[in-house]
Image: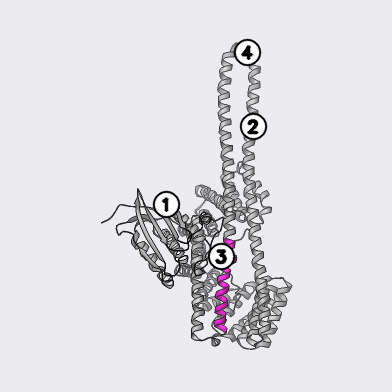
Amino acid sequence: MNRLLVLILFLFISSNAVPAMYINTKIDSLNSLLNTSTDSVKIEIFNELSKAYDTISYDRSLDYAKQALELTKKIKSKEDIAASLDRVARIYYFLTNYDESINYFIESLKMREKTGDKKAIAQSYNNLGVVYLNLENDIKTLEYLQKSWDLSIDIGDEELMKKAANNLGIVYMKLSNYDKSLEYYQKALKLTKETDIKQLSVCLNNIGMVYWYLKNYDKALEYYLDALKINEEEKYKWSISNTSRNIGIIYIESHNYNKASLYLEKALKIAEEIDSKHLIKDCYITFSHLYFAKGNYKKAYEYHKMYSEVKDSIFTKELRKNIAELEVKFETVKKEKEIEILKNEKEINVLKLENNKTQRNFLIIVLSLIVLLIIILYSRYLLKMKTNKLLETKNQQLNIAIEKISKSEADLKKLNTTKDKLFSILSHDLRSPFSSILGFSEMLYYKTGDFDAAQIKEIAATIYETSRETFDLLDNMLEWSRAQTGSIIFEPENIHLKDLVNSTVGLLANSAKKKDIIISNEIPEQIYVFVDNNMINTVLRNLLSNAIKFTRQKGKIKITSRDIDNFIEITMADSGVGIKPEDIKKLFGIDIGFSTVGTDNEKGTGLGLILCKEFIKKNNGKIWVESELGKGSNFIFTLSKTKTTD
């Protein structure tokens, strides 16, 4: 069953979210103070500007945080420097650049170790644990969170102990180590003061969740009921609905359907009162499970249908919200660029006025001091040359600013196209296969007895194929996203080309075998290329996967190479269906979103070829297609070669 677990992950991040439409005045006000402020005050202004930009542009927020850091290093104490490093690390965390976030957090930690501030050191350990949790590095996560716990105990700081214990409970639950999770949640509960009612309720709910996973329904019910009592006393309506639904789930598991129905009705009623779509959605799916367990399949279907409708409305609402936020951010950045142009124009006008004033004064001097005509003319010439040079410089700056705005607009259009492509993949190409996986797995889970072994094997094969295709899509999306954000480190090395191709052929051998396709690797043994191994591996995998997809049963795929000056030209030729001439130019464009189905109705998104183009370009190569409809296609690309080895 879908469960909603209320977890408070004690992150180092504090929210400074302010709607973008209200922060422009604050930004302008802060900027106006910079020129007249001391360095010490500038640090505060830079930090405030960084916080203001958190809701508009994390890149700009990072710029101001780094300016604050540079000044802090010059005039502030080690404690202040550590705090400033912490701020930069947090923004990198929001930008999902976890490697840089870790680097700055570690630098902050080293600074705090020098000062001996144990409380700050414990907080740094906790911060690093949270970042490593996002990287799914369980070993590092546990290492730093355990250090935070041990040091918090050593200094007797109960607030830090509570944070570390709660985080360790979350990690161990994620690792399905429920006994350890329960141990730390119990410690967090003991450390939670009776006055901290909200946190007390969350701890009880989390412990109930662990007992639910351990199938100890009596203990789970005991903690859920304690949490519900607190929520009702404090009138925490959201928590009342959530906990009531959890209790309903326990009673479904215990086959006490009457009590389950009572608590679920209560949960749904409150969810509707506070208009929480997420809670309503979860109540509907739980009611569906209840009626399915009671054998009332019609009611189960009706609630499942209502669940799907609410889920779709939530998705649509969130999609619109994301689009609106992007539009607000676009308009804000555009306005900043326009202000920058106006400032440049104002400076030019000031120079023109100064020039006019100088000329007027010069005429007065000429009329009154005719004897100094030669000196004055010479002075005027020099002044005019200087002024023209200044005007030329400002004009050049204005042209550069205009070019930057044009480039920014082009980049924003590209980002908008990228956004649409990602939303398209998320809303269709990912949801569709997951719906198939959920549908077939639900059939296997609830109706295993209705199928024979052959049918079960056929359904399992469908689930496997759909999962593998979806995993490949997610892998391509991740690689492409990292390429767009510059998160991929380019590490070229000398690679034996034939071995690299053989490893890719071996990886996709089963896919080719299903269609009786023969793959021949005719690349000479002596060929080496100077490339990034991971990137070119991804290129070969996508190209070969496409070749298999569009090659008919018992077809052939041939991989060859030839020397051309300082490059190796690799050709992947298939005997497939070929490509229409008008479709070839659509293959590598993110803005077109072109894809077709394979010879066995294999689906794709077109993202793979776009990723290939990105990685080939990164490795200083080129990629193109030669194809004849009905006879097959040649995908050709070049790579830098190295000296031949014996």
Where is mark 1, residue-wise? 621
Q: Using the image, tell me which numbered label, if any, was put on residue 369.
A: 4
What is the CA distance from the residue labelled 2 to the residue labelled 3? Answer: 50 Å
What is the CA distance from the residue labelled 2 to the residue labelled 1? Answer: 50 Å
Q: Nearer the viewer, mark 2 or mark 1?
A: 1
Q: Amino acid at mark 3?
A: Leu
Q: Amino acid at mark 2?
A: Val
Residue at 39% in and 59% down: 533
Provide residue 188's location: percent of width, then percent of height: 56, 74
Give yes or no for residue 149 being in the magenta stretch. no
Q: Residues within 10 Å of mark 1 (few under 14, many from 20)?
A: some
Task: State which tag comes first along the sequence, 3 or 1.
Answer: 3
Give the main secondary structure, helix, strand or loop, of the magenta stretch. helix
Q: Which residues are magenta?
A: 422-446
Q: Residue furthest left?
A: 646
Callout 2: helix, strand or loop? helix
Callout 4: helix, strand or loop? loop
Q: Amino acid at mark 1?
A: Gly
